[in-house]
Amino acid sequence: MNNNLKIGIVSDTHDVAIIRSLLSKFETKTYFIPDMQENIFAEYIDGVLVVQVTKNDPNTAQFLHNIKENEFKNAIFVINGGNASAVTNVARMGFSDIFAFPYEIYKFDSFISDKIQNQHFHAPDMPTNSITEVYSDIDNICGVDPKSKELLKLAKKVAINPSANLILLGETGTGKGVMAKAIHNFSDKRSSPFIDIICTAIPSNLLESELFGYEKGAFTDAKTSKIGLFELAEDGTIFLDEIADLSMQLQSKLLRAIEKKYFRRIGGIKDIPINARIISATNKDLLEMINRKEFRQDLYYRLNVLSLEILPLRERREDIIFFAEKFLNEFSERFGLKKLKFDKDAVDYLYNHNWPGNIRELRHAIERAILLSESEKLTRNSLQNSVKESNETRFFTKAPLTGSNIVKLDVNYKHTDLNGVDIIYAREVLKREDGNKSRTAKLLGVSRPKLDKLLNTN
């Protein structure tokens, strides 16, 4: 933990017991600031302010305005009591780290724990090419590979049509959440809330109340009414990550809400309209899940009005060095180091590594390599030591060969080029996997569209 980090708690009420309790487990210096003072920003320039908002009044509005005017970026907002208008007001001022208490307590706890452990808080003079700026700018999130440039064009077209629901496909770590936020920021919904939820982060029996909220007395523990995430999103964007993991029961309720364009809180009688755009994401094959009766086909078509597939790094290798350089500059600045460089062998390693964890793995590897580096150049060894090697090399498995795993290809070398070998090999693996395209694509290390293209080539 960062023992030197200073955390200030600012609130429009003196009741900050929950926040203090959550922060007490961290070995940091925590202070309660009784009044929303304009002159406190300089004191916390290297720390963080947790700003609790419970009401809409002129003093609170002025303090939020002061945060924006002072370009103070180290602020986390806690909206207490289910105040939807307060959430909207804070979001419309351009702040993104917003947590609605009490039902986002665990999310807040996880968020601040990660930030403290990784020392991700930074001063407001952070250069404009920082990762936070990159993540909010659609022109900087796709990279330089021709495939990424094509994705960027499609993303912009999708963004300017915010009435259509969108589904993002791609492996873990490819940046689906980043893309969702960038599309929101590029659309005309940018001034409205962006609400994201990871469907697997909340127990399925609680997820319905998170999405739709509930009325006081709806069940035993419902001592107060609670606003759901769809209601908080208003006319903005709601991002449902890992949508494939929704239970069949919740899939039915989500489908009904989307079809009717309104919902009711649990125990409620009032119809609440859905004006938000729904962006979903998954790393699973939904069509395969539909065949197995694990995902509703009608919900799939409601969510998949438009779709974008974010390819893994191994299929857009020109992006690897692009992002590696960005992360290198970011962490050099953050840790107060001279501008580091990659040596030639390091560049070769970056380019040729398979990166099964995609951009997320690349970013973490470079961060660790910089922290462990003792010179101004990052070497192949420093990167290798920072990467948790998978069981695969770039092309071949390290698992022992058995008779059942061996594929023999009868190829006429005078009439078959390398592209032809790819096609023959893909078809043979598909046979071994009993026609299961999802498993075949995973074994070959390609996307489903890439596999389909191979299989359909004459």
Image: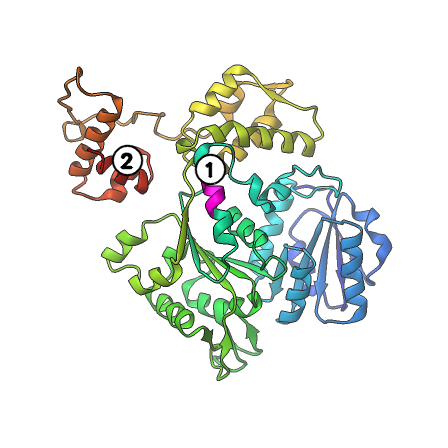
Q: Nearer the viewer, residue 400 or 172?
A: 172
Query: Magenta stretch?
Result: 148-154
Q: Is residue 150 magenta?
A: yes
Q: Residues within 10 Å of mark 1 (few under 14, many from 20)?
A: some
What residue would you read off at disc 2? Answer: 443
Which residue is located at x 54 percent, y 40 percent?
141
Res 434 visible: yes
Type of amino acid under label 2: Leu
Q: Is residue 392 above or below residue 99?
A: above
Mark 2 vs mark 1: which is more N-terminal? Answer: 1
Q: Secondary structure at mark 2?
A: helix
- Left/right placement of residue 160 relative to residue 3 reads left
Q: Is residue 448 magenta?
A: no
Q: Is residue 132 above or below residue 236?
A: above
What residue would you read off at disc 1? Answer: 148
- Left/right placement of residue 338 relative to residue 146 reads right
Res. 192 image quadrant:
bottom right
Res 83 visible: no
Structure colour scheme = rainbow
Q: Position of residue 224 (x, y in %)?
A: 58, 78
